[in-house]
């Protein structure tokens, strides 16, 4: 599967311009050339500004996420390292299906109006947000997309490309302020449902000769996600990040902000990963040991790979998880169409807190920069027994019982 934003790539002078291919189709303007970005006269300069901004993020997952939110070609971002804005290959990636907000990503939205993004005002950003809302974008989606846009324009402001940040809006007035009182929309999975996902992954239907490989990979993906990994962290891991520390198998994970953390493997996750890598090596005809650290050249390959050894995308993992949830049957029937990798990360935190794990340990496990973020997940422990509603009702009833005659 290719990236969901589709698009293609070109030379250094073309860069991001092919992002507008779908927009040109939408506007029914075949006379536009592939070199043209509607409303932008110096597209190469704009491309350089975008590349300069993205290259500041050491985490490839962060770059991919930001690129997706703005409507940039994922393939272009994949070829860019933090220290370089070198040209991308001329060969275009295969077309991929697009998400429901594909055409409403910021750069595509600007292009459909022949507007240079550097000329955007706060009114334009508000109009874009209203368009997203009308298209069904949830509040948290709009929050994330606005945050990404504000980060981009913050960079343009710093380098003098624009006079002010048009995305620096009053989020309270827009109804996009984040509050600890907001209920989390993430579905809550129980330990039993996680077990059902693991069992279903092992039985995932596949009629090819690589059934054992695909089943082992599915189990490994689910098992690793139950450790609280972000999906971007999972797909960004290489085999050389699997190592032994203090006699224990662990992963060296690159998280947000370019910060590394050690994630120790449970016996369940270690077994699933060992089985997958062993089957993968057997299928590929290699003899690469499962745990070899950095001493083997094969160790630099992706930890979770496609059949041809390429890196899986976050969308591949999401699609796989949905298939597994459907396979799980009644245990996941109510949430199979809404499950996603973050739900398993959410489950790790809430189940850990339910088991009275120290919140500082959970914070370190999942890489939260602030313990307040970990506490935010604690709302998932809300049950009938943890509400004061019954106490209030009891007081009201007691007041009625003591009413004077």
Image (cartoon, rainbow, N blue to C red):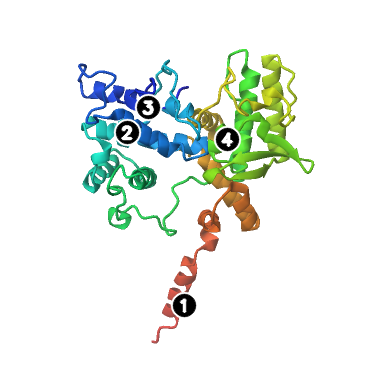
Left or right of 116 in this view: 105: right
Element at badge 3?
A: loop
Q: Residue 328, position in %: x, y?
A: 56, 32
Q: Residue 13, position in %: x, y?
A: 35, 23
Residue shown at the point (54%, 26%) measured from the top left:
312
- The answer to whether residue 333 is seen in the rendering is no
Q: Residue 17, position in %: x, y?
A: 32, 25
Residue placed furthest toward the bottom? 405
Element at badge 1?
A: helix
Q: Which residue is mark 1?
A: 398
Residue shown at the point (53%, 28%) measured from the top left:
320
Which tag is nearer the camera, tag 3 or tag 4? 4
Which tag is nearer the camera, tag 2 or tag 1? 2
Residue shown at the point (33%, 47%) measured from the top left:
157
Left or right of 152 in this view: 231: right
Q: Quadrant of residue 234?
A: top right
Q: CA distance from mark 3 to mark 1?
A: 59 Å
Mark positioned earlier in the residue sequence (2 or 1): 2
What numbered label is drawn on residue 98? 3
What numbered label is drawn on residue 155? none
- The image shows residue 72, relative to residue 167, as above or below, that is above
Q: Give the position of the C terminus as an image quadrant.
A: bottom left
Which tag is nearer the camera, tag 2 or tag 3? 2
Q: Which residue is mark 2?
A: 46
Q: CA distance from mark 2 to mark 3?
A: 24 Å
Element at badge 4?
A: helix
């Amino acid at each position: 599967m290719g990236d969901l934003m589709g698009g293609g790539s070109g030379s250094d002078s073309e860069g991001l311009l092919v992002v507008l291919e779908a927009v040109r189709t939408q506007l029914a303007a075949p006379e536009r050339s592939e070199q043209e970005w509607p409303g932008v006269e110096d597209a190469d300069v704009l491309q350089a500004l975008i590349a300069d901004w993205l290259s500041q993020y050491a985490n490839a997952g962060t770059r991919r996420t930001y690129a997706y939110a703005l409507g940039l070609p994922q393939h272009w971002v994949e070829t860019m390292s933090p220290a370089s804005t070198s040209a991308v290959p001329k060969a275009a990636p295969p077309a991929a299906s697009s998400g429901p907000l594909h055409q409403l990503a910021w750069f595509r939205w600007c292009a459909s109006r022949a507007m240079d993004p550097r000329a955007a005002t706060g009114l334009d950003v508000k109009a874009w947000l209203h368009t997203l809302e009308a298209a069904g974008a949830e509040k948290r989606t709009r929050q994330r997309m606005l945050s990404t846009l504000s980060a981009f324009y913050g960079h343009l402001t710093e380098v003098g490309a624009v006079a002010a940040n048009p995305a620096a809006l009053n989020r309270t007035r827009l109804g996009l302020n984040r509050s600890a009182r907001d209920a989390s929309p993430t579905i809550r999975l129980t330990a039993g449902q996680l077990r059902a996902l693991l069992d279903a992954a092992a039985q995932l239907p596949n009629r090819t000769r690589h059934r054992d490989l695909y089943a082992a990979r599915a189990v490994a993906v689910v098992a690793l996600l139950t450790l609280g990994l972000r999906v971007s962290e999972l797909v960004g891991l290489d085999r050389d990040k699997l190592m032994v520390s203090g006699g224990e198998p662990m992963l060296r994970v690159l998280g947000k902000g370019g910060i590394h953390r050690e994630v120790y493997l449970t016996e369940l996750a270690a077994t699933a990963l060992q089985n997958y890598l062993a089957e993968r090596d057997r299928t590929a005809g290699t003899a690469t040991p499962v745990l070899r650290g950095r001493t083997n050249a094969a160790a630099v390959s992706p930890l979770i790979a496609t059949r041809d050894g390429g890196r899986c995308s976050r969308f591949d993992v999401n699609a796989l998880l949905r298939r597994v949830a459907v396979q799980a049957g009644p245990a996941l029937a109510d949430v199979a169409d809404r499950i996603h990798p973050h739900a398993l990360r959410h489950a790790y935190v809430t189940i850990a807190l339910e088991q009275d794990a120290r919140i500082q340990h959970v914070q370190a496990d999942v890489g939260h920069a602030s313990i307040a973020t970990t506490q935010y997940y604690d709302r998932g422990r809300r049950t009938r027994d943890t509400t004061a509603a019954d106490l209030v009702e009891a007081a009201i009833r007691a007041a009625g019982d003591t009413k004077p005659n």
